[in-house]
Each structure stands twice: as C-alpha cells, then as structure tokens.
Amino acid sequence: MCVNVRASPEQVRSKLIQALATESEPPQTAGELLRRIAFGSALHLLRYQRNEAVLNLLARVYVLDALKRWVPEVELVAVSVVRGGDELRLTVRYREAGQPSATVDDATVCMAG
C-alpha cells in the first residue's frame, strides 16, 4: 500500500523558512544544529556584506542551494534583498516544483546583524 501525503501550504512555507533561517555548516563553524550540522543555508554569511549587486546574486545562490537540498518540493521564482540598518530582509517567491501554473507564494526571512 502506497500513501502519498501532501504537505499543506503552511507546512511548506514553515519548512522553507526554517531551512533558510538555520545556519548551515560553513567552513568557519560547525553549523547550528548539533546532530545535523549541514542542515540550513549559508545566508547568515551575508549579514555583514555591503549592499551591492553581488549581495543579491549570492543570496539567490544560497537560497537556491538550500531549497534544492532541503525543500525540493518548491521551485524558486525570485529573491529580493533589502538591507535596513543592521537588518537583512530577504523575500523569497516560490511555487510548487514542476507546476508552472501553481500559485506563487512569498516568505520573508529577517536576519539581524
């Protein structure tokens, strides 16, 4: 017997935010989760970067990498980065993977510097 359980949009959004907001294992640290140091994204490395075109490109690469690895059920549509004072705010637009006509949803991740 095969059961296909599909996550609700709220569960998918929660999973996406958790994957992006969790610090993964960069070369300098051991990651945020004790027994799963690879889980998460490298977005925390952007906190202290200057607000330049490269910041947006790196954010897109880091988001895409985390989504492919930890939330494969979504497809990235767009990433926007806004820096305000000590805060870095990323808005991620995504939809169900493989469904070009699926509804596009937004998730926002804020990181304080």
Image: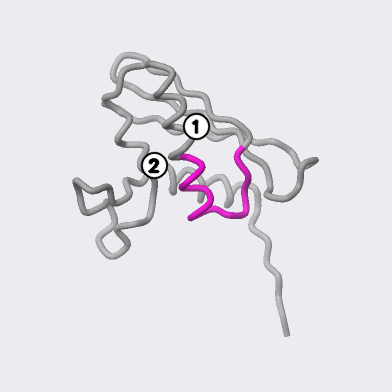
What span is colored magenta in the figure? Answer: 63-76
Residue type, numbered disc 1: Thr
Cα distance, mark 2 to mark 1? 10 Å
Q: Which residue extends farthest bottom?
A: 1
Q: Which disc, if any, is residue 81?
A: none
Residue type, numbered disc 2: Ala
Give 15 or 73, whichever is nearer the viewer.
Answer: 73
Q: Do the residues labelled 2 and 1 touch (CB within 8 Å)?
A: no
Residue 33 point in image, percent of width and height: 29, 56
Badge 2 crowding class, 10 Å Cα cut-off, few under 14, some 14 to 19, many 20 or more, is some
Marker count (numbered): 2
Give 11 or 28, whichever is nearer the viewer.
Answer: 28
What residue lies at 26% left-to-right and 52% top-to-bottom? 31
Q: Which disc, if any, is residue 108?
A: 1
Residue 95 point in image, percent of width and height: 67, 42
Residue 88 point in image, percent of width and height: 37, 24
Q: Is residue 70 magenta?
A: yes
Name the N-terminal-most of marks 2 and 1: 2
Q: Quadrant of the C terminus?
A: top left
What residue lies at 28% left-to-right and 19% top-to-bottom? 86
Badge 1 crowding class, 10 Å Cα cut-off, few under 14, some 14 to 19, many 20 or more, is some
Give 68 or 83, whichever is nearer the viewer.
Answer: 68
What residue lies at 52% left-to-right and 48% top-to-bottom? 67
What residue lies at 43% left-to-right and 40% top-to-bottom? 62
Q: Which disc, if any, is residue 21?
A: 2
Quadrant in the picture for residue 37: bottom left
Q: In which quarter of the image is the N terminus?
A: bottom right
Residue 3 point in image, percent of width and height: 71, 75
